[in-house]
Each structure stands twice: as C-alpha cells, then as structure tokens.
Image (cartoon, rainbow, N blue to C red):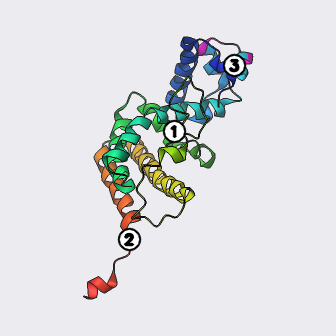
Amino acid sequence: MPKPTFFNLPSNKRQHLLDEALREFSHKPYNEVSISSIIKNAQIPRGSFYQYFDDKMDLYNYLIKTKQAAYLDDWLQAIKNHNGDLFQVFKDYYGDLLLQIASSPDANFFRNVFLHMDYKRSQSFNGMIPKKGEFHPDHPPFDRSRFDILKDVDTTNLKISSKAEIMTLMHLLSSVFQQVLSYYYLMQQIKPGTWPVEKAQAQFDQLISWIQYGVQKDKAQEEG
C-alpha cells in the first residue's frame, strides 16, 4: 500500500511513476526489475521512492491491485446479471476476462505476472476484490469490503455456512483462473500458436465445472 506521501503528489506525477513502473514490469520479470531503473525513468530521487513505497514489492502489489480494480464494476454487474450464481459468473465473466487480458495493452505485464508467480507474489493476485480501506479515496471504489461486494452471491445452492467460506471458495476459483492463465502464457512462450486463448477458455470452463459438479462419476447412475 503506498504511503500518504504518494497520494499527496499531483495526480500527473503519481501516474507518471506508475506508468514507468508498469513499463519496467512489462518488459522484465519481477526479479529482474530494479528500483534504480524505475526511478531513473520516472526521474525521481531514490529517497523520494521510499517516501512513496516501502519497497519494490509494495509498488508491484499496488500495480496489480489497481489493474484488478479496473474490472471491479464489471464483476459486480456480472453477479447481478447471473442472479448471484457464482459458478456461472466465473464461467462467463472470467472466461471473457481471459480474452480481455490476453489482448489488452497490459498483456505483457500480465504475462510476466503469471509466468513468474511464486507463492508470495500469488498472494497479490489471490482474490480479485480489495479489502476495505486498502486503497486511498483517490481510487474508488476501494471503500467497499470484500464481504459487501459478495453480498449478492446466492448461496442457497452452495454448501456454504459463513462469509469466510464464501471467500475460501472465491480464492479456490480464482486460483483456477491463475493456473489457466499461467499455462496459456507458458504455451505461448514454448509453443507459440498451439494454445490459443479459446483453448484456455475451454480448459477454464472444464475445471470450474469439475469443482461445481465433481469429477468422479456416479456409479449408481451408471449401473442404473
């Protein structure tokens, strides 16, 4: 989370720093990006950087969260459109999101995020929705909590007994999205053209269906 000093900057200066950071993380994996290169391109002193962010990971996490938040309103609308059916939302919304990410101007950034994701960095992407108070008011709608955003999810047909369990399910389904997108980018790297985004979408739909309906066949129905 950026420090208050960052939000005291004029908006154009904040955006310039974020743009230069995004450029670096789009061109190189996280481990190959240096603070030196970011501050050189952003034309700010090293001391100023540490007045804005704790470290490189702090800046990186913030970039990821801002990209996720850009899709927040679409997510909320998808829940309403599907009458709170969480699995259908994931199949339709996240299925479309695979295509959007793969073809977006930030495709190279997401490629590096997913191809070089370890456990610690995966926590930056674990769940799409920011926590309450996680962002500054200059970046709405971050004042909504995770639970408030999920209040329209219909749990009547789910084996869910608490809000915490809804979040656990959300994290599970989100991890499938991460896995599929990581595999898509890997195939683009090692076998270009052999794994189009449509295959990734079909794979994602299958995996979500397995979680929804199970993988094991019903022997009673087969014998019947």
Compare residues 142 and 118 and report the one nearer the observer: 142
Q: What's under tag 1, amino acid-wise?
A: Val
Residue of label 3: 5
Q: Earlier in the sequence, mark 3 or mark 1?
A: 3
Q: What's under tag 3, amino acid-wise?
A: Thr
In the rendered image, is residue 173 in sight? yes
| Secondary structure category for the residue under label 1 | helix
Instruction: Looking at this view, name the residue that lies furthest to the left.
Output: 224
Q: Is residue 208 left or right of residue 138?
A: left
Give residue 176's position: percent from left, percent from top: 45, 54
Question: Please, is residue 197 above or below residue 160 in the view?
Answer: above
Instruction: Looking at this view, name the residue that lies furthest to the bottom.
Output: 223
Q: Nearer the viewer, mark 3 or mark 1?
A: 3
Rounded to the nearest angstrom, the CA distance separating label 2 from label 1 is 30 Å
Quarter of the picture containing the N terminus is top right
Give residue 171's position: percent from left, percent from top: 51, 53
Compare residues 15 and 45 and report the one nearer the observer: 15
Name the residue: 55% across, 42% down: 145
Give residue 13's position: percent from left, percent from top: 58, 12
Range of residues picked out in magenta: 41-47
Residue of label 2: 215
Residue of label 1: 113
At label 2, counting other C-alpha atoms closer than 10 Å, the crowd grade (few under 14, some 14-19, many 20 or more) is few
Give residue 115's position: percent from left, percent from top: 50, 43
| Secondary structure category for the residue under label 3 | helix
Q: Earlier in the sequence, mark 2 or mark 1?
A: 1
Q: Earlier in the sequence, mark 2 or mark 3?
A: 3
Q: What's under tag 2, amino acid-wise?
A: Val
8 inside magenta stretch: no
Name the residue: 32% across, 44% down: 197
At label 1, counting other C-alpha atoms closer than 10 Å, the crowd grade (few under 14, some 14-19, many 20 or more) is many
